[in-house]
């Protein structure tokens, strides 16, 4: 595994509240320990057996169970932060990680929010505004619209953009609510469906239109920025292997794309962040198709797939988040990536319906293999609840070559022992062994095409 660049001391922070759960909570606990900072975790009754609860310096129960009554309950989290005398809050990813109101409450209470300033969470949280801002700074974008105000304005924008196009919620993420539209006659129905999902999922029914790209690559760029106005990139991640717009497999470097093109785009993103005064960590997501690239959005938080960048650069991104929030300087970037890293997301789900699988983990044995890193927030005897994300573990395999990294990921998946819930391991193995994937011929529709072929994925 890579030797991560670690910096001793966490600046001004003595104790950090981790406002999250699962693998990312465990990951932040580890970063705090390596920096000599005390960690505080929160947990619901179904997460009480999570391994990170036992190893954190302090752990506090949450009274609710559903997300709105627990990990999204700002009042409860702020009360625990103040009770524990934490001087900083790390939101992880998901939940409140990109919530500007929560970030401002943390700051108003005299603590540090580990992430960009609330103003950046606001500016980048609305995809229409983010697209406009980045386009003004010279970042390429595919044809799109402003915020849709009514059906007539949508039709006018659609005529300008052309078909096929996609209707997208302006808030939220993860592909939720997206509707692909082939013909003008279907636009009004797609708008209504997208708005219903956006209202329910994000409490924000704002929509916009964007040109639909057939078989694109999903390429993202890791950005770090300090409080002194400096920014840098840590190369790219390839995130094209997706199911229903949710990432399944990520890797770095991206296979089969001209390195010069990728480096230029990454540097452009870093330069824009420096010019705008962005602070802390962020990820610029883009689509790449036939030599053209278009900005999608900027995630103002740590990504689920951050581990692949850590493995090829040796830089600990979670530690850097903390150090940058404490006023630290940017790390030294290596001149190039070392080797290859690939991450597969192991979910508790039914292989055929692709719905979450819940229950008690009667067996949960994590393999210990050379060149393989596993991030998880679960252990044997713990319950997989229907209330939270079904991610069981992230398997990050590294190698001198892409082929070696893929091989180690395959071995690691086969070496996992899980009983009590079904998993998507067979689907992941199917993709990893697919000739097109092995040759680097990948795009965001690859998994859906495999499933449409009628190949039955056995339940594991």
Image: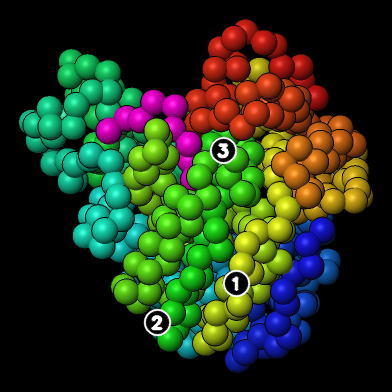
Label 1 sits on a secondary structure element that is loop
Residue ID at (76%, 17%): 458
Labels 2 & 1 near each other (Cβ < 8 A): no
Residue ID at (64%, 69%): 334
Residue 456 in percent (x, y) is at 70, 11
**Residue with the mark numbered 1:** 333
**Left or right side of 25 for 185:** left
Quick one: label 1 or label 3, which is nearer the N terminus? Answer: 3
Label 3 sits on a secondary structure element that is loop
State the residue in front, 355 or 296.
Answer: 296
- Verify whether residue 218 appears in magenta: yes
**Residue with the mark numbered 2:** 229
Q: Is residue 135 above or below residue 217?
A: below
For residue 83, what is the image quadrant? bottom right
**Left or right side of 314 for 207:** left
User: Which range of residues does the magenta coloring cover?
Assistant: 211-219
Q: Is residue 47 visible?
A: no
Residue 153 in percent (x, y) is at 9, 35
Query: What's the mark number on residue 413?
Result: none
Residue ID at (26%, 62%): 137
Labels 3 & 2 near each other (Cβ < 8 A): no
State the residue in front, 334 or 175.
Answer: 334
Quarter holding the N terminus is bottom right
């Amino acid at each position: 595994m890579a030797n991560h660049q670690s910096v001793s001391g966490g600046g001004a922070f003595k104790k950090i509240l981790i406002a999250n759960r699962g693998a990312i909570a465990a990951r932040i606990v580890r970063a705090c320990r390596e920096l000599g900072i005390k960690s505080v975790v929160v947990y619901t009754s179904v997460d009480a057996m999570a391994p990170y609860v036992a190893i954190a310096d302090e752990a506090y129960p949450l009274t609710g169970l559903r997300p709105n009554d627990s990990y999204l309950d700002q009042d409860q989290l702020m009360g625990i932060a103040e009770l524990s005398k934490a001087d900083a809050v790390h939101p992880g990813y998901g939940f409140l990680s990109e919530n500007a109101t929560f970030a401002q409450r943390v700051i108003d209470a005299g603590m540090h929010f580990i992430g960009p300033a609330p103003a950046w969470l606001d500016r980048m949280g609305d995809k229409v505004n983010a697209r406009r801002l980045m386009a003004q700074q010279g970042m390429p974008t595919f044809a799109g619209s402003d915020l849709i105000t009514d059906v007539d304005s949508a039709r006018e924008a659609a005529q300008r953009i052309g078909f096929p196009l996609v209707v997208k919620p302006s808030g939220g993420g993860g592909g939720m609510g997206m509707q692909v539209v082939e013909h003008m006659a279907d636009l009004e129905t797609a708008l209504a469906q997208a708005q219903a999902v956006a209202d329910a999922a994000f409490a924000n029914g704002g929509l916009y239109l964007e040109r639909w790209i057939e078989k694109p690559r999903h390429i993202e760029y890791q950005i770090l920025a300090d409080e002194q106005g400096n920014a840098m990139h840590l190369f790219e991640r390839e995130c094209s292997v997706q199911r229903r717009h949710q990432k399944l497999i990520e890797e770095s470097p991206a296979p089969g794309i001209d390195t010069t093109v990728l480096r230029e785009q990454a540097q452009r993103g870093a330069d824009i962040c420096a010019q705008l005064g962005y602070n802390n960590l962020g990820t610029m997501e883009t689509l790449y198709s036939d030599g053209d690239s278009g900005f999608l959005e900027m995630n103002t938080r740590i990504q689920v797939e951050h581990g692949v960048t850590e493995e090829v650069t040796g830089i600990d991104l979670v530690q850097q988040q903390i150090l940058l929030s404490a006023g630290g300087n940017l790390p030294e970037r290596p001149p190039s990536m070392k080797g290859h890293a690939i991450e597969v997301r192991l979910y508790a789900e039914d292989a055929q319906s692709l719905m979450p699988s819940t229950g008690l983990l009667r067996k949960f044995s994590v393999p210990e293999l050379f060149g393989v890193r596993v991030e998880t927030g679960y252990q044997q005897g713990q319950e997989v609840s229907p209330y939270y994300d079904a991610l069981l573990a992230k398997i990050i395999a590294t190698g001198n070559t892409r082929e070696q990294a893929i091989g180690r990921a395959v071995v690691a998946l086969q070496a996992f022992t899980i009983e009590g819930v079904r998993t998507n391991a067979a689907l992941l193995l199917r993709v990893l062994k697919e000739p097109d994937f092995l040759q680097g011929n990948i795009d965001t529709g690859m998994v859906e095409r495999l499933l449409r072929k009628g190949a039955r994925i056995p339940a594991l």
